Image (cartoon, coloured by chain):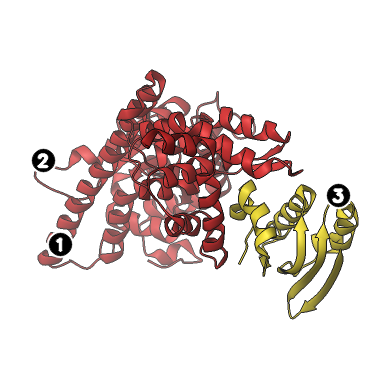
Amino acid sequence: MEYKENTADYGLDLHCTSIIEEYRRMLPVLQKLGDLVLSSIRKCLDRNRILVTTVEGRIKQEASLAGKLELKGLKYNSLSDITDIVGARVVSFYYDEVDKIAALMDNIFEVDWENSVDKRKALGKDSFGYMSLHYVCRLPKSLYFDPDCPQINDIRFEVQMRTTLQHVWATMNHDTGYKSGVQIPQEYTRTLSRLAGLLELADDEFTRLRREIADYRRRTEQLFKDGDFNEVELDSNTFRSYLASEPFASLLRRISDINQAEIQPVNGMYYLPVLLKMGFSTIGDIERLKREYSDAAYQLAVHHFSGTDIDIISSMLALQNLCFVYLVDNGSGAAEIARFLDKVNGKSNYNFDAAARIFNAVKSLPYMKKKEKKKE
Amino acid sequence: MNVTIYNEGRQTKVVLDGRLDTTNADQFQKDIAPLMEGADPDIEIDCEKMEYTSSQGLRIFLMLQKSVTGRGGKMVMKRMSPQVKEVFDITGFSHIITIV
């Protein structure tokens, strides 16, 4: 139905026309209520650190209200019987967050349980379709009260809560036919139901995935606490946590002490693919690298810095030197070191010459010479 | 050390000639001060004739790079001699500064 300037032009009966007129009178209050509802929801979600994809609201358009009254006007005695004139929607990422958000809405608003409906449960066990939780609420006086506008606390509004995928389905369903007044052929209804099932499955999988990742993080943190590094697989999460524990601080301090150097902090995550490529698969492997080669890595720094006045180094220098001595000690030549430099510093024509210098420097370290002697 | 700065299109070119050490680091910092501001931040530093850089030089390059990237630009150092490159390598700065 389209908007009509004159309420009588909607062609509704007297009763429904009076509801439209009431709507027009109440519009400023409804808009004020809509703003209050939205800001209350946003504040509440922020306070509880719940990240959602969308918080949105709307006041039902007059034409849409007229359409509703045309279909089921007799059901309503007055405007206050229509509970979705003011509506808000919270769209969450995960299925299990919908219930959490619902509990928060129950905390901040007065929920009219009789008229609230969990459409997720309204569907039969063997059918798929619209999944959303609808709460009909009132604004409690404890949250907002204006003596000049006390009716604002009596007006009911609707809060819809659903996941992003449920929202996608609802939007597509709405777009493809609902409310259009045209009966959709059964084959399309079936396709929509199948898609609802697919999205429900995806919702469950995303929620399960998040739970499993959280469990994995907790397990890994515990392994870190227990110092059981051999069990901790090397990946972006574990390596980030490992770096945060400053595992090379002691070696770095020894190196910086050579020339009382300032340490330039650098995010060391770029080393992860390099270490994986070198064959390290657990945090324990890096701990072993550190244990076995710290002295040699320090000797390499002494070789480089003694006789210079260089007094600034990268915070990743300790790991860089550990990798150099590890590579040479495990039979790598200048070519492998050049490839290592390509990965760490980016491909460059300089890398092969630099690798040759590093190879010779490592070979000349007391640590390596001692090892050679032992072999003889 | 001689510092030549000129513009080529939207890019600023800096040509360094000589040693960058404690004796001239302050002057170098003054020379490049105008590059720390401006709307066209892309900078190319030609190091072919740079003979050496001290830690002070590394600090200044780092500061300049931070300023350039902070303004959405890019700083690259080019044609470095092996001796100068070695200073960047042994300090771990070859990853921090873009050297091509």
Amino acid carrying mark 3 in the image: Thr
Residue name at image x 62 percent, y 42 percent: A303
- Left or right of A204, for residue A235: right
Residue at which label 3 appears:
B22
Looking at the image, is A184 positioned above or below residue A95?
below
Q: Which residue is mark 1?
A: A191
Q: Marks 2 and 3: same chain?
A: no
Q: Quadrant of the N terminus of chain A?
A: bottom left
Residue closer to the observer: A56 or B47 = B47
Look at the image and tell me whether residue A87 can be seen. no
Nearer mark to the viewer, of 2 and 3? 3
Find chain A in the image and tell me its colour.
Answer: red
From the image, state the color of chain B. yellow
User: Which is more toward the observer, A87 or B7?
Assistant: B7
Q: Which residue is mark 2?
A: A125
Is tag 1's residue or tag 2's residue first in the polypeptide sequence? 2
Please rate how many residues cluster around mark 2, counting C-alpha atoms within 10 Å: few if below 14, some from 14 to 19, many from 20. Answer: few
Q: Is residue A65 above or below residue A297?
A: below
For label 1, the SS is helix
Q: Which residue lies at the image location 58% right of the left edge and 53% below the top edge?
A: B95
Taking the image as shown, residue B58 lies to the left or right of residue A181, namely right
Q: Label 2 to label 3, Cα distance in Å?
A: 78 Å
**Where is residue A181 drawn, in percent x and y?**
25, 66
Q: Is there any visible trace of residue A11 in the rendered image?
A: yes
Q: Please report, as a chain letter, where disc 1 is located.
A: A
In the image, is A320 to the left or to the right of A131?
right
Residue B98, percent across and down?
62, 61
Residue at x 83%, y 72% (from the top left corner): B5
Residue A150 in the image: state x and y as whole percent.
Answer: 57, 31
